[in-house]
Amino acid sequence: MTRRRLAGLLSVAAPTALLLGLCVPTPGSESAWAGEAAKSAQPAAAADLQGASVVRDREIAYVMTNTHWAIYQTPDGKEECPQGLNDGPREQFNAMFPDNGAKYTYKDTAMAREIATWFPTTDKDQFPFREASGKYAYGLNLDGKIGPNDFMSPGPEGEPGVDNQLYRVIGCVGNYRLNGTLDIFINNYMQQYNYNRVVIELTDVDSLENDNDVTVSIYRGLNHLLTDGTGNDFVPGGSQKLDLRWGKQFIRHFHGKIVKGVLTTEPVDAVLPAMQNTADTTIELIKGMRLKLKLTPEHAEGVMAGYADIDTFYREMNEAWSTTILSYGQQSPPSIYKAMRRLADGYPDPKTGQNTAISTAINVDFAQAFIVRDKKDSSKVASSKSAEVGQ
């Protein structure tokens, strides 16, 4: 109990005692009386703090409120994109079919480009593709090595060996950069549509500061995000029911540890919901996904890193976004596919040896939330620590 709160209790207690005819401490005995009051108030104060804690029964949950493909970006873009940004569908189409008086058929122009989009090849791109370069990128060291193609994480405590080859692909594509069309849309739709609701739950939690073994679970939530009075910012304390029927494909259970308030997890193949517009429900498959999140009782923030399955990423991009939307930020699917295949660095196909996934990272923010379970809800994970001690 703080001195200020104790003083407040004393100021109220004295006149109340007089009215009730109780003994009031005389001058000189205040310190002894205050000591006894403090002792008697300690259990209540501890109970108040325990009741106010969001870690209940060694469990705490968070719901995702912001998500962005991790793009390291300087103010003028010259460090990472010294040759400028890539061309998109409109620019490439105009270059292939210039308005020079020549006659073109619909089959040989628009239809040919649609075919190239939906049935891409690894043939050499007829257009130059500008990969993001430079020293820095967001992400994690996924393979435990420091190679010539790896990055350094930004900041004064930058770590070497960051694997994020997808950043090379989309880092100089206008749609994915800060305030790019897709960067805005993906985040807004994630917040707007409940299909995209990602919930993580930590169980076996002894401390949010240091804990060498916690169980981490991923679910799809069913409720809207809790906003503040402006409706623009998201606040902790909301409720989320879990989709245990239609969202089974999204459920994952794995382990992690907390060191100095930072959660890091073991890798897991994660399937995440992705809905754009009102009916385009797709998924994102991140193989070997790991979390690195700074935890507080109210929020969690950091990166979700792993290897994006190329076919899933490419299909989600085309199913969710029309060529018009992709043209807003110079995003050419055929060129992106060729670059992804060229830079892929994980999960080789057992038959061909060709890599099927590309290292990536997603910047994410979460707000603390309470999971609401009904009697039929069997999602609660049994405590592995209790099982170890035979309880």
Image (spheres, rainbow, N blue to C red):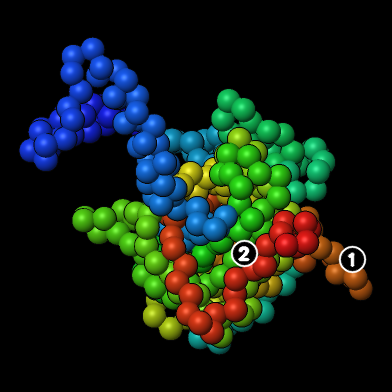
The location of residue 284, given as percent across then percent down, is 60, 69
Write down the quadrant of residue 309 in the picture: bottom right
Task: Residue at 34% x, 54% y: name it.
Answer: 235
Secondary structure under tag 2 reads strand
In the foreground, 303 or 263: 263
Outermost residue, right direction? 351
Q: Amino acid at mark 2?
A: Ser
In the current view of this chain or complex, which residue is farthest to the top? 28
Q: Is residue 70 left or right of residue 223?
A: right
- x, y percent for residue 77: 49, 38
Does residue 311 lie above or below 172 as drawn?
below
Position of 262 with respect to 228 (left or right) is: right
The quarter of the picture where residue 46 lies is: top left
* Residue 310: % across, % down: 69, 67
Q: Nearer the viewer, residue 19 or 64?
A: 19
Residue pointed to by mark 1: 353
Out of 13 and 20, give the one closest to the viewer: 20
Query: Residue at coordinates 47% horizontally, 80% vertically from top-left?
Result: 374
Side of 210 relative to 343 (left or right): left
Quick one: quadrant of the N terminus? top left
Amino acid residing under circle 1: Gly
The tag earlier along the polypeptide, 2 or 1, is 2
Which mark, residue 217? 2
Percent across and percent down for residue 88 are 50, 62
